[in-house]
C-alpha cells in the first residue's frame, strides 16, 4: 500500500474530478442514518470502491458511498457509511475520509452516530449533542511515523466540539421544537457491545453515551483545522441499564424511527450555519 499522504492526494484528485463545486460542509451519517442523503439535491454519488486507495465500508446498514450535492443551497459532501476501526482497518484509513473532506474544502464536519445511552436521564430515541469525548480506549488516530499532515504534532483538544456550532445546534433544535440532550461520548473499539461492568465503569468516568466511532474522526478533523459538531442518536440504553440483550437490528430499527426528526435537525443546521 502506498503512503497515506499519496493515497489521500490520489483520492482527492479523483473525487475533485467528479465534483463541480467544492463542499462547504462534510457530514458523516451513522448507522441507519444514511437516509438523510435523500435530502441532498442535485446529488452525485461516488462509491468508496471507485476511489483509488480508499477503504470500504463493510457494515450492514452502511452503504459505502459519498453523496455530494446541496442542502438548502449549501454544498455538502455526505458519507453514507463510515469506516470503523473494528472492520480491521488501521486508524489512518479510518480517518482518511475526514481528511479527504477537509482537503476537498469542507470547513465544518458534522459527525453523527448511533450510540448506547449511559446517562439514566436518556431514553432510546433521544438525540444527544456531543459536548466532549473520551477516546482513551482506542488508539490515537494521529500516531504516525511520518507526521506529514498540516496539523501540529501535539494538537490541543480542549474544545473538540466547537462551542459556536453547539450553540447554533441547540438553537436549531429549539426552533424545531425538538429536545436535544447534551453529553460526553465515549468511543470503544467494538465490535462486541459492552458488558454491564464496562458500562458502569464508563458511567463513573463521566460518559453519557457509548459507541464505536466518531471520536477519532473528530480528533483528525480538529487536527487538520475543521470545526466539528457531533450528534448521537441514542438507539438503545447501554448494557446493564437496559434489561434486554443488544442487537444491531434493534439499533437499525431505532435509527429508522428517528430518521425523520434527525434529518430535519441536520438540514436546519446546515442551512443556518454553513
Ligand atoms: N454500544 C456501543 N455502540 C453502540 C451501542 C451500544 O450500546 N448502540 C449503538 N451503537
Image (cartoon, rainbow, N blue to C red):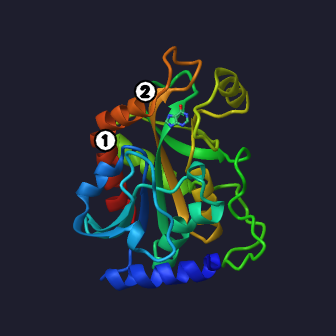
Q: Residue at x 60, y 54 (%)?
A: 88
Q: Please, which residue is most extreme toward the left here?
A: 42
**Crowding at mark 2 (Cα within 10 Å: few <14, some 14-19, many 20+):** some
Q: Above or below — where is 37 with respect to 247?
A: below
Q: Residue at x 60, y 71 (%)?
A: 225
Quarter the C terminus occupies = bottom left
- The Cα atoms of the two marked residues, 2 and 1, are separated by 13 Å
Q: Is residue 136 left or right of residue 44?
A: right
Of 7 and 243, which appears nearest the observer?
A: 7
**Crowding at mark 1 (Cα within 10 Å: few <14, some 14-19, many 20+):** some
The percent coordinates of residue 15 (x first, y second) are: 40, 79
The label on residue 124 is 2
Query: Does the Cβ of the disc 2 residue fall within 8 Å of ligand 1?
Result: no
Residue to which mark 1 is pinned:
259
Q: Which of the 4 quarters of the picture holds residue 204? A: top right
The percent coordinates of residue 57 (x first, y second) are: 45, 57
Q: Residue at x 45, y 85 (%)?
A: 13
Q: Above or below — where is 132 with respect to 154?
A: above
- Number of numbered callouts drawn: 2
Element at badge 1?
Answer: helix
Q: Is residue 160 left or right of residue 247?
A: right
Q: Is residue 4 left or right of residue 153?
A: left
Of 56 and 19, which appears nearest the observer?
A: 56
One can see residue 177 in this view: no
Q: Please, which residue is most extreme toward the front here?
A: 1
The percent coordinates of residue 223 (x first, y second) are: 65, 67
Amino acid at each position: 500500500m502506498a503512503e497515506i499522504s499519496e493515497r489521500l492526494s490520489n483520492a482527492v484528485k479523483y473525487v475533485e474530478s467528479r465534483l463541480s463545486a467544492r463542499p462547504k460542509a462534510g457530514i458523516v451519517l451513522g448507522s441507519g442514518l444514511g437516509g438523510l442523503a435523500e435530502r441532498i439535491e442535485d446529488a452525485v454519488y461516488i462509491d468508496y470502491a471507485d476511489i483509488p486507495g480508499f477503504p470500504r465500508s463493510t457494515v450492514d446498514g452502511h452503504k459505502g458511498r459519498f453523496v455530494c450535492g446541496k442542502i438548502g443551497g449549501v454544498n455538502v459532501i455526505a458519507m453514507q457509511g463510515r469506516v470503523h476501526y473494528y472492520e480491521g482497518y488501521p486508524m489512518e484509513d479510518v480517518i482518511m475520509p475526514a481528511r479527504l473532506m477537509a482537503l476537498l474544502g469542507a470547513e465544518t464536519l458534522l459527525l453523527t452516530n448511533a450510540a448506547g445511552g449511559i446517562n439514566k436521564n436518556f431514553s432510546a430515541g433521544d438525540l444527544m449533542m456531543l459536548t466532549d469525548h473520551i477516546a482513551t480506549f482506542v488508539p490515537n488516530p494521529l500516531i504516525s511515523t511520518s507526521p506529514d499532515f498540516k496539523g501540529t504534532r501535539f494538537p490541543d483538544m480542549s474544545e473538540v466540539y466547537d462551542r459556536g456550532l453547539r450553540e447554533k445546534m441547540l438553537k436549531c433544535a429549539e426552533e424545531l421544537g425538538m429536545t436535544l440532550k447534551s453529553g460526553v461520548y465515549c468511543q470503544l473499539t467494538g465490535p462486541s457491545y459492552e458488558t454491564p461492568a464496562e458500562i458502569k465503569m464508563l458511567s463513573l468516568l463521566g460518559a453519557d453515551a457509548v459507541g464505536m466511532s466518531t471520536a477519532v474522526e473528530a480528533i483528525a478533523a480538529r487536527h487538520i483545522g475543521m470545526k466539528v459538531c457531533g450528534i448521537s442518536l441514542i438507539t438503545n440504553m447501554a448494557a446493564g441499564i437496559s434489561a434486554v440483550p443488544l442487537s444491531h437490528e434493534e439499533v437499525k430499527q431505532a435509527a429508522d424511527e428517528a430518521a425523520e426528526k434527525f434529518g430535519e435537525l441536520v438540514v436546519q443546521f446546515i442551512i443556518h450555519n454553513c
